[in-house]
Amino acid sequence: MAQKPSIPKGTRDFSPVEMARRNYIFDTIKKNFRLFGYKQIETPSMENLCTLMGKYGEEGDKLLFKIQNSGDFLKSCSDEELADRNLIKLTNKMCEKGLRYDLTVPFARFVVQHRNDLQMPFKRYQIQPVWRADRPQKGRYREFYQCDADVVGSDSLLNEVELLSLIDKTFGELGINIVVKVNNRKILTGIAETIGEADKIVDITVAIDKIDKIGLDNVKAELLEKGLSQQAVAALEPILTLTGSNEEKMQVMKEFLKDSATGQKGIEEMCEVIGGIDTIGHKADMEIDISLARGLNYYTGTILEVKAKDVAIGSITGGGRYDNLTGVFGMPGLSGVGISFGADRIYDVMTQLELFPAELGQTVKVMFVNFGTNEALQSLKYVKALREAGIPAQLYPDNAKMKKQMSTADSDNIPFVAFVGESELGKDAIVLKDMISGEQQTLTLGETIERLS
């Protein structure tokens, strides 16, 4: 019995229509990346495992796909180690490479490796797939594309303002109503200091990063399990539920963090970034959200996430500033800031809201009907001329029944059908039918090109 074909959970096939829609998203994002001065690079799908491990926190490391060494992958493992069945230790010996978890860490490796060839500040964009061994669910996949833009080699907060403007413009063109949530990791550090739990900053950020998924009560329970005192959690709660305008939130935080120099610096940076984007103008809502944490450990300053207002789904864009990500690769002190568009989630949002242009499914503008050998050869000459004029055209390959040929044009959403029958042979004549209106005209080749252009 033949095996039923399947694909791994958390991955997908894409039909021609789906690819047309995905490319619409990619092209819109790519156009704006270039408009804002970013240059494209690519990095390998796999990286050395030592490049990836330890950059995403303990939970992130668990989600890395490891690639088993080729050949005798057990040759470095002793019988004692195999018998001990220490999975982490065995994995480290059997796997030297892994699929990239995101595009930011590979980019940091790229910057350090090619630093002598790069002019700082360096603005790059990158559109490639990434892989995470996560539990598949709606809006969360194991293989998905990220569309990243980063600036490295500049401490200026104008970079954050520009990225917020880029987000605003891109989602405006895609037609998605969004809210951009903004915070600063220095503020979170200041909160941890103020509540007397400075050494628990990682536990705090990891926990509150889940607040939208598991709710405030479960976040509080997790913080208590991590060793925070009841008093500290109680002091944290009103901050995580802070409401009001951006100005009102900052006034509350200035008072709350008055004894934390780090927290005050975070507030200063936040006010500069929000003030900057307000000055140049924006359509999207820009909201300060003190509960926003972004669980990745490498963020050190501004952090942001984008949510679709009309669809219940996770963040569709995220990012932030990292002051020393390249330090782990031997190049300390290089500051950077970047964002990542979640193309797959953006696709799901646009599908649910029916935001894709109807004409995206059209790949061919005119199809010539096949009446037989002589008519087909004449039609191919016309097809060649139309293609040279930049008009997508094709000939139906088989001399099939007219009903079948017309049905193909209809199902493929081809707007025009052309007929070159026996009476048109030897003449500069094409019968062109508009599939929407049903109108037919007999035109010359030149007139056909003009009509279809």
Image (cartoon, helix red, strand yellow):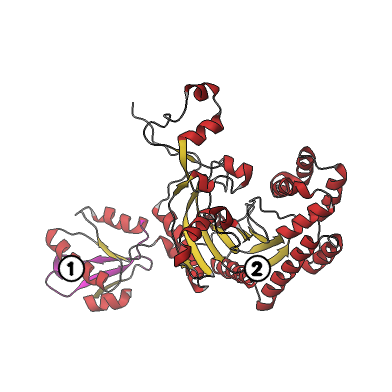
Q: Nearer the viewer, residue 142 or 7?
A: 142
* Position above or below: 327 against 118: above
The type of residue carrying mark 2 is Ala
Q: Name the element at disc 2.
A: loop
Quarter residue 53 falls in:
top right
Binning the other alpha carbons within 10 Å of mark 1 as few (below 14), some (14 to 19) or many (20 upward) gives few
Asked if residue 116 is among those painted magenta in the image, a careful observer would answer: no
Residue position marked by numbered label 2 in the rendering: 284
Q: Which mark is residue 39?
A: none
Q: Look at 51% across and 58% down and name the residue there.
A: 107
Query: Label 1 sits on what residue type?
Result: Lys
CB contact under 8 Å: marks 2 and 1: no
Residue at left 13%, top 69%? 425
Left or right position of 398 against 415: left
Dividing the image into 4 quarters, which one contains the C terminus? bottom left
Where does the image place residue 105, in percent across and percent down from the top left?
54, 54
**Does 41 sit left or right of 164 as displayed?**
left
Along the viewing direction, whichever of 228 and 209 lies nearer the viewer:
228
Residue 363 as seen in the image, left or right of residue 51: left
Give the SS element for disc 1. Answer: helix
Q: Position of residue 88 (x, y in %)?
A: 56, 33
- Residue 5 seen in render: yes
Q: Position of residue 69 (x, y in %)?
A: 42, 37
The Cα atoms of the two marked residues, 2 and 1, are separated by 51 Å
Asked whether the viewer can see residue 29, the reply is no
**On the picture, is 201 further left or further right than 327?**
right
Give the residues drawn in magenta, as a range: 412-437
Question: For mark 1, what is the residue?
Answer: 381
Residue 252 appears in which quarter of the rendering? Answer: bottom right
